[in-house]
Image (tube, rainbow, N blue to C red):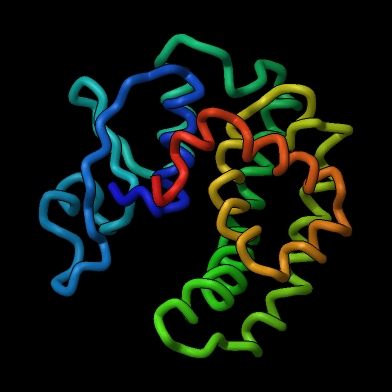
Amino acid sequence: MAPYSVYVRAVRLALEEKGVAYRLDPVDVFAKDGPPASLLERQPFGRIPAFEHDGFRLYEAGAIERYVDEAFPGPALQPSAPRERARVNQLTSILDSYAYRTLVWDIYVERVSVPKQGRAPDEARIQTALPKAQLCLRAINDLMDDGPYLAGAALTLADLHAAPMFAYFTLAPEAEALLAEQPAIKAWWASMSRRPAVQATAYPA
């Protein structure tokens, strides 16, 4: 898997927080000839991560994260109560459906990655993304219920799913003003970024 991937890192964070030893097998999904055949055998869409445990193969980051939480001992990363568990799933869905592309691809990639490649950022794309990012952050903030974690008082998969996205997003200068409007999320990220698991999975390591 690729350590730079947001979704690979989210799975790694779940493994780290559960104290599970794992092996990371590098795969270049952006190779000139496309994803390698070995990956396509395990993930027909050619995406990462693809996961295997004792012969059980699984893909899709959210499914892997939930499996890791339920299959291994260690601190629970999902609430047992239906409403609290639904809130974790809701936050994860918001992150996947709305926040990921906006925060990572439309803002971070354009503002930070593209210039590193010697190209000019698409300013129109960034400007279009800013109100969408504002909406995403406000929606997440409104669900925090006094925190300090995204789904309330305890660390959950929602935090681990979000952290890799925010690790990239906060490298863009636009993030500072957007997070200033949502101090609860700003404080959450300051705390999350200091967690040993987050530091252990940082890219580049």
Residue drawn at x 43%, y 17% is 19
Residue at figure coordinates x 55%, y 77% from the top left? 110
Q: Quick one: which residue is furthest to the left in this view?
A: 37
Q: Please tell me which residue is depicted at 64% across the width and 88% down the height of the picture.
A: 123
**Height in image: 138 above or below 201?**
below
Left or right: where does residue 70 sit relative to residue 176?
A: left
The image quarter in which residue 125 lies: bottom right
Position of 93 relative to 149 (above/below): below
Q: Which is nearer the eye, 5 or 196? A: 196
Expressed as whole percent of the image width and height from the top left, the position of residue 6 reads: 47, 51
Tell me: residue 81, above or below residue 126: above
Q: Residue at x 72, y 64 (%)?
A: 175
Residue 76, quarter of the rendered image:
top right
Q: Quadrant of residue 163?
A: top right
- Say left or right for 160 vs 143: left
Instruction: Assign the C terminus to one quadrant of the image.
Output: top left
Residue 179, given in percent of the width and then of the height, sits at 80, 57
